[in-house]
Amino acid sequence: MTIIGHTLGFPRIGLHRELKYALEYYWNGKIKENKLLEIGRTLRRRHWKQQKDSGIDWIPVGDFAWYDHVLTTSMMLNNIPNRHRTDQENDNLTTLFRISRGYSFNKKLIPPAEMKKWFNTNYHYIVPEFVHTQEFRLNWMQLFDEIDEALSLKYTVKPILLGPISYLWLGKVKGKKFDRLSLLPNLLSVYQEILDILSSKNIDWVQIDEPILVLELPFQWLEAYLSTYEQLHGTVKLLLTTYFDNIYHQLDIITQLKIDGLHADLVSNSDNIPLLHAQLPKHWVLSAGVINGRNIWKTNLHNWFKKLSPLVGERKLWIGSSCSFLHSPIDLNIETKLKKHIKEWFAFAVQKCCEIKMLCTALNAKYADDSTHEDILSEYYVSNNLRSDSSAIYNIQVKKRLEDINEIAHSRCAPYATRVTLQHKKLNLPLLPTTTIGSFPQTKEIRKLRFRFKNNQINKEDYHLNIKNYIKEIIIEQEKLGLDVLVHGEPERNDMVEYFGENLNGFIFTQNGWVQSYGSRCVKPPVIIGDISRSKPITTEWINYAQSLTKKPIKGILTGPVTIMYWSFPREDIQRKTIALQLALSIRDEVIDLEKFGIGIIQIDEPALREGLPLKHSDQKKYLEWAIDVFRITVSSVKDETQIHTHMCYSEFSDIMDSILALDADVISIEASRSDEKMLQSIQYVTKNLNEIGPGIYDIHSPNAPTQNELITKINQLLKYIPKQRLWINPDCGLKTRSWPETKQSLSNMVSAAKLLRKQSYLP
């Protein structure tokens, strides 16, 4: 039984972010659709070849997407909200971008679909919308076109489908309430049609992703799996694919399914490999997800070799990635600035494909009683075993601070009810105070300035002078707009996480380690390689300068410790709680310095708080306890009259509102521009428990500026749930990706809407 290697998907953005730039050129009218399609085709072919050249046996097809793979599934199933449909047949790209980005029609903003985090990752998916009259049918044929394309190049193809039950679970009901599972019969008829077409193309195996099986699902959803896979089985072989956590709690159901193989994420939990082997039907393939698709450290292949060796010859075994490599950078080989001994610790997607091949080769050799490859696996990981001796890893002062952490306060001095009076007296803000989340447009000139400074093309004095000029322009614009609480605009920051990593000890940075966050938005996570500490102030120079330019309060913006950790590639040799506490002490030092220099409002951004939440409810309490403690340690030093804000976005927060309250932030800004009444009801619960809140009143990711009347309607909707004394008016996220014209137009409308409502005598 030959052990074969496969991946669950490959990064789609391109080695140099070609897809990002192509999409943005297309949206801006700089290239035509045929050019965009050509770039996509070039990327797919390159990525297939990279995997094949690295030794991958089954090439995944269906992992490419123009914006998001869940949205691609919706398009294939003709699940298109009526507001986004076009008059033209087969105008699929236009429709796809209407759903994902929104558009204007007759001077009216048509909102995009909601966007949420993909499980516990920093990737965002477009939420499917379901109505009670829903009818699915086969629509967009992109998957089949891509399969034909790959087959014409002589690849052994493994198509990828998002499973029908996960698709229904990930969506939301719009309008009249009904049970999403009632849509399953119609949905399955389309899935059967898809599988029939794949069979006609002589496809042998289909990867059908059912990631929700790692959750603790209601019984009726688990029960639906039995009938679903009874119906779908038999046309082609089905590899049921799970990832991001273990599925041992679901084995009783899974082992009853009519499928041909199971993929398990063993990186999440490898302890029960013998249990999997014992309980899965003997004729099934076990696909072992042992190569971490979410981090960039080399894999200890010899360790996996020992764990998997007992299965060799006992069952059909595949070796794969724990999840799609969508969450990994593409190729380590183009990193030219990493120190050699540090570079040897890492593996990107291409190198991880090679790891899959190496492990397959060693296991196949064992089956043939050839042990020579086992030594190769041991040698491969030598550099990582030597990390413990590196001076870049351990810091005795950091260890001492952690040992003494209980000697500092873990909460503010006074309760919110006391603090709020002092803060209102000090700040003297109007009702419905207006502000922004932090960043302002990052123009080409700003990016070029940072690039020149980073590459020693200008000196520090010139760089600082230019940055201060940009800050001055940003302050002037905010005062013209009439905003109540200003920000310095962050022109010095390349990214909210990378910037802080660059100014802390314990981080290193890649040149091209980009991963997709959503659509054309890409991030380049820092890599945490050692103990974290702050050597000097990070933000005080810029924020203090901004405050010197205005009498209005400046809000200091810091990225929170949990977000810095989860939006980096973290160490794997210590617990994440320990990493977060190291970061908390570092950011706490920055908070102390900002307050010392007179900054009275400090925002600690924690958009990744929800992202770090374990997927199983039974595991969540422990995480939330330490994550809340980490935030409170970060801000516990400030005076009662200093107002602490936090910002969160694009996650399902309604189920952890109690934990958000426990952060004890004075003001919470949260993404609500794409959210529905359920989120507003959660927000109402928050305000009954004292906190002030700024639900984002417009979507900054949409290219369409909201009108004043639309914003007035939105604010009035919020006022049904939130007392006017506790409502802040702000966008839903930072503005760095927007242009200045649209930013000024949107903010002008936002400020004027707030001012108009203040004047109206019937303001609730």
Image (tube, helix red, strand yellow):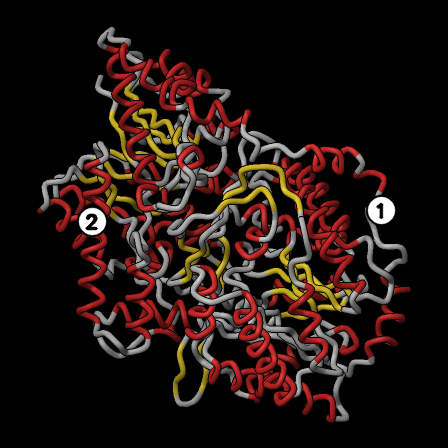
The quadrant of the rendering that contains the N terminus is top left
The quadrant of the rendering that contains the C terminus is bottom right
Q: Which residue is mark 2?
A: 46
Instruction: Say if 47 sits above or below 112 in the image.
Output: above
* SS assignment at label 2: helix
Question: As drawn, is 700 to the left or to the right of 757?
Answer: left
Check disc 2 and give the amino acid type: Arg
- Circle 2 packing at 10 Å, graded few (<14), some (14-19), many (20+), is some
Displayed quadrant of residue 551: bottom right
Instruction: Say if 416 sits above or below 332 in the image.
Output: below
Viewer-proximal residue among 695 and 297: 297
Instruction: Where is residue 17? Give x, y as percent.
Output: 33, 58
Disc 1 or 2, which lies upstream in sequence? 2
Question: As drawn, is 188 to the left or to the right of 690?
Answer: left
The span from disc 1 to disc 2 (Cα, nearest Å) is 54 Å
Question: As drawn, is 38 to the left or to the right of 80?
Answer: left
Instruction: Where is residue 636? Give x, y as percent.
Output: 81, 53
Q: Which residue is mark 1?
A: 409
Q: Residue at x 44, y 68 (%)?
A: 447
- Circle 1 packing at 10 Å, graded few (<14), some (14-19), many (20+), is some
Viewer-proximal residue among 246 and 417: 417
Looking at the image, do the residues carrying marks 1 and 2 touch, with CB atoms under 8 Å apart? no
Viewer-proximal residue among 5 and 96: 5
* SS assignment at label 1: loop
- Does residue 225 show up? no
